[in-house]
Image: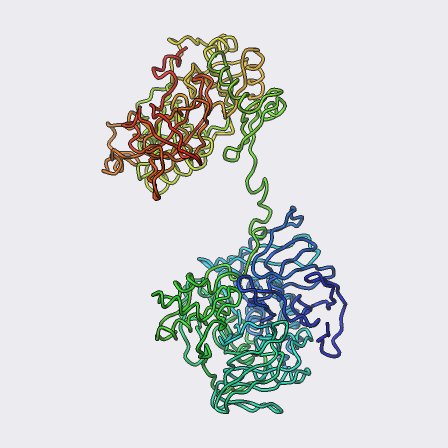
Amino acid sequence: MTSRRREGVAGETLRFRYDGRDYEGLRGDTLAAALLANGVRAVVRSEGLGRPRGIYAAWTEEPNALVQIEEPFPEPMLQATTVELYDGLVATGLGGRGRLADRPDPARYDAVHAHCDVLVVGAGPAGLAAATAAAASGARVILADDRPAAGGCLPDTGETVDGVSGTTWAAGMLAELAGRPEARVLPRTTVFGYYDDNYLVAVERREEGAASRERIWRIRARRVVLATGAHERPIAFAGNDRPGVMLAGAARAYANRYGVLAGRRAVVFTTGDGAYDAARDLAAAGVEIAAVADVRREAPALAGTDVLSGHVVTGVGAAQDGSVASVTVSGPSGEREIEADLLLVSGGWNPVVHLFSQSGGALRFDEELHAFVPGEAAQAVEVAGAARGVYTLAGCLEDGVAAGTRAAEAAGFRVPPRPVPAAERVTALPSGRLWLVPADDYATHFVDLQREVTVADVMRATEAGLRSVEHVKRYTTAGTAHDQGKLSGVLTSAVVAHVTGVEIGDLGTTTFRAPYAPVSFAALAGRDRGMLHDPVRVTSLHGWHAAHGALFENVGQWKRPWYYPRPGEDMETAVLRECRAVREGAGAMDASTLGKIDVQGPGAAEFLDRLYTNMMSTLKVGAIRYGVMCRADGMVFDDGTVMRLAEDRFLATTTTGNAAAVLDWMEEWLQTEWPSLRVYCTSVTEHWATVALAGPRSRAVLAGLAPGLAVDAASFPFMTWRDAEVAGIPARVCRISFSGELAYEINVNAWDGLALWEAVMGTGVVTPYGTETMHVLRAEKGYPIIGQDTDGTVTPADLGMDWVVSKKKADFVGKRSHTRADTSRPDRKHLVGLLPEDPGLLLPEGAHLVATSRLPEPPVRALGHVTSSYRSAALGRTFALALVSGGRERIGERLYVPLGGDPVPVTVTHHVLYDPEGARRDG
């Protein structure tokens, strides 16, 4: 490749690989700059159309040059314009679809919470002026900028400030801030979200080799100054996506900042004076400026260059690799084809209003600037410089000092007088206004290069009746992905306005939402990943379970024993053995994970009455009652037991997975709806280890372990609890059964859990069983699992549990919804049992049920679905539970389950399939 470095540019040489070829660049380059320096023009092919694409911009507004970093660690969908070059970098071009790493990320990601009096976003001329003015007052100032070095556009333009180069002046401002103990400068830090109460979130990219790769900053500021600059605006014309078509300011930046020439011979297509400065700098660097096509009838002169007033670009000729070979311009002098390998485009400038808009600020359309600028602010924010349409360097400096002063003074500080940095004042001719070049065919007039959205696509959207730019965005995807409206947003609005005949100011823009720039999930997670993100919780008995061969399943965050396979057993065999042990002898399960909430206070009984569908205030001390909670819509939310420990104290149990949600539900009602109730709720789940002892021999086992406890049915009836010593350990023993067998739940201090379990196992007659066996046992008895046999549309009545809904209580959460006509429809889905005609067929959970043995043409009405399905040792066959429309009226009816071939027949039964009389409960 031919080098396109400007003469005299030197620096440390870095080696990198791109798309399988080796190149060299210089320290300080971006990957994009290094590729241009090596003459790489077509860097990717677009995802949908497969068209060659080149580098279009110089920073975060880049739509084309998306890359995958391969080494040192795979990272997808990065912009080559923002990737800092380092030795050993390996990257490949992406057309729009990345690839996640196939190995764990070794990097660390951090997060910081920071507070300041003034946050300045953007370290360009306006931002530096604002930050130094505010910091001079002694205020706590944070200056955040997304580039590696401060200065904003100054290294791109080569302008001077206070008689020195812009980069030298910027370095002096940084030195001044470094001397302020309350000032902090964050380079490589993109502020991507602006939220309520001046809460902003930023991501800091660390240098290669740093201890952490990225760091999230969560900043709360008293005042904010947005000095976020402006993006140069593209123009839609035929072939505007070809490699070699580039924003004029970007080509100027590559020449001045990196010493890289983007081409040899250029045509400039512009609507204003800004592109002339770019043309002069490029000409001085050695690029031949073949012509300037200026849409304005009166255009300034450019020494040594043919300026074509009133002309537009109507086409781009392609070289063999698809890049620019010639440019066709049309205007008053006719049509001309000009040989060139670079086309510089400047349709004006769009202030970067993304953060201002995120803050709730209103935008207005400026008819002179032909751009949307900040209007009325919604938060304590100032906007300075190009971000509010001030485009001259002198104006930005003046604006920055004023904004920083106002922000610091509004935060309560006194800013000492300081001179405004001096810069050349430039007067520009009024800019022209052109969004798209008219043509007969708009198939290659691209509005969004990354999403490959053309003017033709936008027209199709409006022809379909869409008039809102928000709707057009969703129809076409323009302005999504990396762009987020940086280049395509206003252009899309302009095209919609042009096509529909409305003013762009009346049409408005799409909504600017966070994040302003892409943020990795790893950065957002920080160190909260793996066990820190979703902690693995284990019971005090976990070590015993693991040592005795248990396999585990995840229930919420808990590791629960799933089943205990013996040598040679598969899951089916092991579970059937465990089920038989519980039904015929005695089994024990670790039930410590059940949620346990201590509810205390004078209003505790009334509080529980309001939350549960049945009465809890009538419970006697020492008694237990099963209860169901519903949401306000009357649908089942959770179930469990409530035991009364004292007149003003209860212990409520919940399902394992819903423990946190139920506690949150309780607190929400106490804090927002019933603050007058004196009630205190405390999670005590991990305070207790719970062993469920079940089976016809469980009474004898408990009697041997607790000789001081009267365990006969008369002394210790169902749904009561007793304090006793079990195996010499203080315990609370409850007569509760979730299997339908005689059963007890023995609760001890978590520290004593292992000793209790080993004592139970030491009897030699108890079989440990896991959650799969528990599911089979409860399903045989028709006991539902909330979240498995319910789906948020199920009432207690649907579950056959009308008895749990009190008819005496004046009110409870969900009561009114139970009286709606909808909740008493005869065709509501009811919980029923299913018996496959083939007793060995295990129905898949989630399978649908239909009424006929042969499926008609779609659509086919599903009557319901299978919620639970098991093999049963007690029944000697398979069975299932299901939610079926009008299920209770269908008992005895034959339905069908489509399983790929012909639907298989099943018989609807009552949901209680084992011991329907409940005779086994008391032993």
Q: How is the image coloured?
A: rainbow
Quadrant of residue 803 in the image? top left
- Residue 752 is situated, as x and y percent measured from the top left of the image, at 56, 21
- Residue 546 is situated, as x and y percent measured from the top left of the image, at 61, 25
- In the rendered view, does 444 fall on the left or right side of 123? left
Q: Identify which residue is drawn at 61% across, 74% down.
A: 323
- Residue 235 is situated, as x and y percent measured from the top left of the image, at 49, 76
From the viewer's perspective, is residue 376 above or below residue 603? below
- Residue 352 is situated, as x and y percent measured from the top left of the image, at 50, 69
Tell me, yes or no, if residue 678 can be seen here.
no
Q: Identify which residue is drawn at 35% across, 65% down.
A: 464
Q: Nearer the viewer, residue 808 or 799?
A: 799
- In the rendered view, does 678 fall on the left or right side of 476? left
Give the total number of marks visible in the rendering.
0
Tell me, yes or no, if residue 439 can be seen here.
yes
Quarter of the picture holding the N terminus = bottom right
From the viewer's perspective, is residue 643 above or below residue 447? above
From the viewer's perspective, is residue 463 above or below residue 195? below
Quadrant of residue 721 in the image? top left
Q: Nearer the viewer, residue 187 or 843?
A: 843
Quadrant of residue 98 in the image? bottom right
Quarter of the picture holding the C terminus = top left
